[in-house]
Amino acid sequence: MQFSFFKNIVIITIFTAFSCGNSGNTKSLSNTTEVQSKVDINRLKKNDTVKEMTREYLLEREPWRKMYLDEFQEDKKQEYYEVAENIDELIVPGANRRSEYLKYLDNKKIGVVANQTSIVIDTLQRSIYDGMESVRSLHLVDYLLGWKNNVTKVFAPEHGFRGKADAGEVVKDGIDTKTGLPIISLYGKNKKPSAEMLAGIDVMVFDIQDVGARFYTYISTLHYVMEACAEQGIPVIVLDRPNPNGHYIDGPILEMEHTSFVGMHPVPVVHGMTIGEYAQMVNGQGWLANKIKCDLTVIPMQNYTHDTPYSLPIKPSPNLPNDVAINLYPSLCFFEGTIVSAGRGTENQFQIFGAPSLQKEFFPYTFTPQANEGSKHPKFKGVACNGLDLTQEPRRDKINLEWLIEAYVSNGRKKEFFNNFFTKLAGTERLQWQIENRYTYSEIRKEWIRPLAEYDKMRQEYLIYE
């Protein structure tokens, strides 16, 4: 696949850099990871975009690399290679396109909205006798500080700066002991930055990996950051990242009387936009308070299309551990508004579902949720659930409602099946009514066709990628 080399570079860095706790911990929140792996240096040399660099040239060009280069023995002849930011056919996230955004940060006091996914891949290829390469992933905060940018505050979304907190868990403010930077939570009482929080900031950088579902709250954090910054006259720079569910749009359109932090805008469940495109739509459609406009700059990716498969190198939240979970999330998250478990408290979150009240004859897979990272108090903790195992489900390009409908029909506690959260997730009361009144999947989908077509027409103005 066209992204396989980039994927390999990223995956081998995996993610010991973020193994400590959330932003309330006393441990440092900004670490650097180094991993070594065998690579074919000769293959890299054939690529015209790979440049040989001497140690002196690297230090002259990028002085902050000294802490890396000094590790190598001076008495050995070595050649250094850097993978250029525009390597053909590799997806290059906005954060890695430093020449496109560092110019906006010079001599500015910078705020950063970030979490564990806010990673810059820094790669030094070295051609030495053992053919090894050195690969480092840097958190965006470390990266900016390395370039002598004046980062003054860091803002953290749901799940915290480390991405360890449970869904819905209040995330506390904290201090990064390595840099001394304040970590300000945007999940809890203060979902929108206050004027006091923004005081002294000249520009805000937003870099968080989204998964393309309306009820995934990072786009709600984006909305409030844009709104608050617009009110204070602070420009916002969004470093764009791929949408792993960007290849389709689907689901009911949110009705504005059902807005909440899991749905703030009249968009379908699967909106089909990158977070940078989504920011442009929020701004362009006048969805910020009083239709205020944010001074917005999106740093686009290179070599990305909406049909490009993309495997996230870091799990975006504790309960989306892999590609299958991310792809099934728009379908299975509806169970969060029912008595059925979506697998929290297991190792297969959002890849299985079940409940004790489902008939084992039709739901033969059994699992027992237990407390784990990201789910301290899972639904049905310690109780065996009957359900289905979807871990081998192929990549979807539509929401599957059949699992939800079948679970409702099979469940022996129909009056208790839905809770108040379901309407917030669906963005409408009609979906629950349709399921309770035995509408089929195809009958429900027919009602989505026209609204989805209207939404698709509207979003075209804001798309950056094919």
Image (spheres, rainbow, N blue to C red):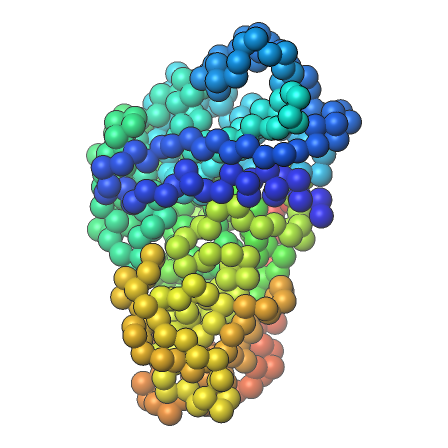
Query: Residue at the spot x=37%, y=38% of the render?
Result: 113
Horizontal side of 24 relative to 356 (left or right) equals: left
Query: Which sits in the foreground, 377 or 329?
Result: 377
Query: With respect to residue 276, does 329 lie above or below?
Result: below
Residue 162 in view of the camera: yes
Image location of residue 185, percent across then percent down: 27, 44
Residue at 55%, 62% (x, y): give it: 324
Residue 351, placed above or below residue 405:
above
Relative to 192, 359 lies left or right: right
Q: Closer to the camera, 107 or 182?
A: 182
Residue at left offset 53%, top offset 46%: 313
Residue 301 % position (x, y): 60, 38
Q: Horizontal placement of 375 versus 315: left or right? A: left
Q: Is residue 361 above or below residue 307?
A: below
Within the image, what quadrant is residue 76 found in?
A: top right
What residue is shown at x 32% (from left), y 42% (from top)? 20
What percent of the width, then of the height, locates residue 31? Answer: 38, 32
Residue 257 appears in the figure = no
Camera-side residue of 380 and 61? 380
- Rendered location of residue 414, percent (x, y): 37, 89
Number of marks in the rendered image: 0
